[in-house]
């Protein structure tokens, strides 16, 4: 294809969304002239499914639930007056609480004001708020935000240790719909202990975002926490960023929540249009389908050329892979669908894995994210008349060309800036693209049976650990192998899991388990200390 032909293809296939200042260029995706027309009937069905979802149809049949994250930025579209009231009341309560915190009306007992915010959550309860905080935050924010998003003790020690004396002026927000998510529960308990060790009342520093009547809701009310905010069963974790999950930390951090919601609302309006060539979410879904043959055969590489969007690939990893990675279709057939997502940031990626993208295995398609505005204020020239931002654009366009020359497909999303409106629009864009793609490949985007299976397997592991500790305590003087102990607790087929548990227990002093013998698993012996 000549440069002139490529320019004409660019103009022909560029999708422009003036309401949010976004364009989507799909000209470097190698779809044929008849592809969009050939997908029309499938896309019409996807549009109809999305329309029904937004009107309140059961969109998650496995759990018999509606899917209402679109109502969060347009409460007037909620199918029932009670839902609209619940959303608007939540938004008003969050805003009022944040104002009181910033004004010092809600304050800690041993400090003048809250200056730090600690969010305890995992998955959708942490990834979205992390993206928003990193994209929009600054050192001028009234509260500086920190995260506990795992059950790694050392990670918790690092975060809580970094807060140090500032824990006295730290407001902690614990986010869990059920309150039973173990990683979040563990982070909450470790945080509570950290407060207690400094002579602080945790409840006077704590806020919960959870389901009504959940374990966390009961714990928060029983321990006199400052506030609880609602989570609803019609909002999934990975699409909860515009519920209290995202709005509580964003308001407390002092971010432009109104602009964030407005950007998402405007993108929703743009992506309801049933004309594919004018609908960027439909085009994204169709390009994913084209690139992977409708089977997810190629990975999605997200390359934002902006430090503030560095976490975009991490956020999309959950949104896309948890939504689309499914074994069964909606009619129960084994399909093993999904799209793998990874990414870095430009131009860092050019010093990381672009070498493979250009010359290695062609198993991906890239999405470049271009931000037109370099920074607030003027930039200095670093070489001749060129600024650092000029170089950043040069690297983006150069990398895109280098990939195209080798037959590697890519799209380019261009936005004006990294504002609250823009971030809200990007999130809404990808939420709807995921919904459209799920319809195209006939899977349920709104459940996560694989995640639940992992939680059940983890529960079995901890059950085995309890039996092991009881057996070791009952026979303190006797050192036994993993095989022997697996037999002793009635789990002979789980000797490997038993060995891994014993290896971990002996490496930590928490349970008093000691290891002797050789380095190989069969040589190792374990006993209670």
Image: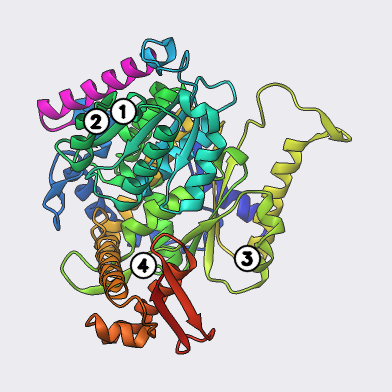
| Mark 2 vs mark 1, CA separation in Å | 6 Å
> Can you name the residue that lies furthest to the front here?
477
Q: Which numbered tag is attached to residue 294?
A: 4
Q: Which residue position is annotated with label 1?
A: 203
| Label 1 crowd (10 A; few <14 / some 14-19 / many >=20) | many
The reply to whether the C-beta atoms of the residues labelled 2 and 3 are less than 8 Å apart is no
Q: Are marks 2 and 4 in contact (CB under 8 Å)?
A: no
Distance (Cα) linking label 1 and label 3: 50 Å
Does the residue at mark 2 contact the one at mark 1 (Cβ under 8 Å)? yes
- Residue 357, numbered label: 3
- Most foreground residue, 237 or 493: 493
First to last magenta residue range: 78-99
What is the image's colouring? rainbow
Q: Is residue 23 magenta?
A: no
Residue at 45%, 29% in the rendered image = 117
Looking at the image, the residue that sits furthest to the bottom is 522
**Residue 313 in view, yes or no:** no
The quadrant in which residue 528 appears is bottom left
Q: Mostly what secondary structure, the magenta segment?
A: helix
Task: Tell me the quadrant of the picture where the C terminus can be found.
Answer: bottom left
Q: Which residue is mark 2?
A: 223
**Closer to the N terminus: mark 3 or mark 4?**
4
């Amino acid at each position: 294809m000549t440069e002139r032909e490529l320019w004409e293809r660019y103009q022909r296939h560029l999708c422009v969304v003036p309401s949010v200042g976004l364009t989507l260029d799909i000209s470097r995706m190698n779809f044929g002239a008849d592809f969009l027309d050939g997908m029309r009937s499938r896309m019409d069905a996807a549009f109809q499914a999305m329309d029904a979802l937004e009107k309140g149809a059961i969109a998650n049949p496995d759990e018999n639930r509606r899917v209402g994250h679109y109502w969060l930025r347009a409460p007037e579209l909620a199918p029932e007056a009670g839902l609209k009231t619940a959303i608007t009341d939540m938004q008003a309560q969050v805003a009022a609480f944040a104002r009181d915190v910033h004004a010092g009306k809600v304050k800690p007992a041993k400090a003048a004001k809250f200056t730090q915010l600690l969010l305890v959550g995992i998955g959708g309860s942490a990834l979205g708020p992390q993206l928003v905080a990193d994209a929009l935050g600054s050192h001028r924010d009234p509260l500086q935000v920190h995260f506990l998003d795992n059950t790694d003790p050392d990670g918790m020690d690092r975060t809580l240790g970094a807060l140090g004396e500032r824990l006295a002026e730290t407001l902690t927000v614990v986010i869990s719909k059920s309150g039973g998510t173990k990683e979040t529960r563990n982070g909450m308990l470790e945080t509570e202990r950290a407060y207690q060790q400094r002579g602080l009342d945790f409840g006077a520093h704590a806020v919960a975002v959870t389901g009504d009547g959940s374990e966390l809701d009961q714990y928060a009310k029983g321990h006199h926490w400052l506030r609880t905010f609602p989570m609803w069963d019609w909002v999934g974790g990975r699409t909860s960023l515009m519920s209290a999950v995202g709005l509580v930390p964003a308001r407390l951090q002092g971010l432009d929540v109104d602009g964030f919601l407005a950007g998402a609302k405007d993108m929703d309006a743009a992506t309801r249009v049933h004309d594919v060539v004018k609908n960027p979410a439909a085009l994204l879904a169709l390009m994913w389908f084209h690139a992977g043959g409708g089977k997810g055969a190629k990975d999605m590489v997200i390359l934002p050329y902006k430090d503030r969007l560095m976490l975009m690939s991490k956020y999309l990893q959950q949104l896309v892979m948890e939504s689309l990675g499914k074994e069964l279709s909606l009619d129960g057939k084994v399909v093993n669908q999904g799209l793998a997502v990874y990414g870095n940031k430009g131009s860092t990626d050019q010093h990381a894995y672009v070498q493979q993208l250009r010359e290695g295995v062609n198993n991906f398609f890239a999405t470049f994210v271009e931000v037109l505005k370099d920074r607030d204020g003027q930039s200095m020239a670093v070489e001749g008349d060129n600024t650092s931002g000029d170089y950043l654009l040069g690297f983006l366009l150069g990398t895109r060309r280098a990939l195209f020359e080798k037959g590697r497909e890519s799209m380019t999303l261009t936005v004006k800036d990294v504002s609250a409106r823009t971030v809200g629009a990007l999130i809404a864009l990808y939420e709807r693209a995921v919904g459209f793609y799920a319809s195209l490949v006939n899977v349920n985007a709104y459940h996560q049976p694989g995640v639940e299976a992992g939680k059940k397997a983890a529960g079995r592991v901890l059950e085995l650990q309890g039996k092991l500790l009881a057996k070791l305590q009952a026979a303190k003087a006797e050192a036994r192998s993993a095989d022997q102990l697996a037999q002793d607790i009635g789990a002979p087929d789980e000797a490997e899991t038993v060995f891994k548990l014993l290896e971990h227990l002996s490496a930590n002093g928490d349970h008093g388990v000691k290891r002797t013998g050789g380095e190989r698993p069969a040589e190792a012996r374990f006993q209670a200390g």
